[in-house]
Amino acid sequence: MICMVLAFSACEMKFELDIPKEESKIFALCVPGARDSTAIIIDLARFAGDDISFDKSKAEIDIRVNGERQEVRYQPKYTFPYVQSDHTVPEESFYITRRMESGDEVSLTVSYPGLESVSASTVVPEGPEDVRFTIETAPRDEWATSEATFTLEYTDPSEDTYYAVVFRKRLHEFRSWGYIEPDGEVITGTDEHIDWEPYIIDCEFDPFQSKQEYNFDAYNNNTGLIFWKNSDALDNNGKKAIFFTSYTEHDYSFRYNDLDYGYTDLSYEATIYRISEELYRYYHTNLLAIENSLSDLGLSRSNFTFSNIKGGFGILGGMAGTALIADVD
């Protein structure tokens, strides 16, 4: 009986944690050079217990290009109905319509009543040079798909530059139709639809990868953007080259109930960017933090995301790109 009492007895001690009081800070994200317009996305990094109200539209945005202050506009929530792809900037964000050029010096300051102002600066890098995009496919299978190698080549002898690529797929779909009028006349036609959609290639460094040419330190940030250090790309006859393996579709059609269905003129677009160092570091550390699931369990140290926003969090980083299209036979 005594042993049982000792086994189930417990001690209780009350103590107070001395948690330092921290102020909420502004989060800002801006990537000049990615599009014709430049969006400035802001939010509040709110610390526990801070009940400060935050209305994004009331923030003051000061963005300058080569020292010249730009006109800033605010995009409220889009009203229904709309198609998100028709819009060039995210809803509830600020933006400017100036097209950035390589070498532009961009500075950003964000202010909000009751919060510390934040600021950052960056330079839009030079775009990729002498870029070539090709696709080599293996024989197609019964489902009109085949293994494919996507190859990007470019010229850059530097070891301390950084790159990224985004792929899109172009589908030209068609569907024939027909019906008979009451007077017996046969009416036929064909509906066609051309659409560009994101094409995400799985890409993760694998030390056990058997094919060395496909095994380099490139990372996919789960939105389709693949980024890497130029020093990790392969040397190929005086040029840099990177390779991705994936599966592609081919022209395909079938007939059902005397009607034709399928798609044709399949092609892929690769937009390759040269990105600033701070943008690479932000993407890289953010990805490491997301994939560090052990830290959620307290089994490893947390990864901290890089930021060049003084007084807050986020990133101001430049990029410059060029788009190329490769057809699939």
Image: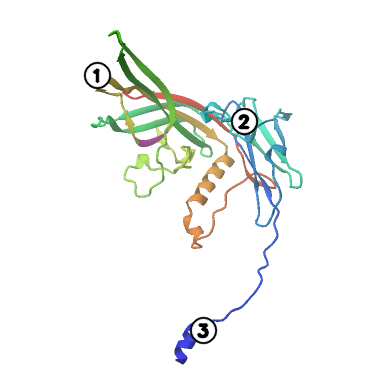
Magenta residues (range):
241-245
Q: Which residue lies under the disc numbered 2?
A: 38
Q: Disc number at residue 9?
A: 3
Please name the amino acid that badge 2 sits on: Thr
Task: Mark yes or no: residue 273 visible.
Answer: yes
Please name the amino acid that badge 1 sits on: Asp
- Element type where label 2 sits in the image: strand
The answer to if 165 sits in the magenta stretch is no
Answer left or right for 167 relative to 210: right
- Relative height, residue 313 to residue 248 (above, below): below
Q: Mark 2 to mark 3: distance in Å?
A: 64 Å
Q: In which quarter of the image is residue 258?
A: top left
Tell me how the rendering is colored.
Answer: rainbow
Q: Which residue lies under the disc numbered 1?
A: 258
* Residue at 40%, 41% in the rendered image: 202
Q: In which quarter of the image is residue 141?
A: top left
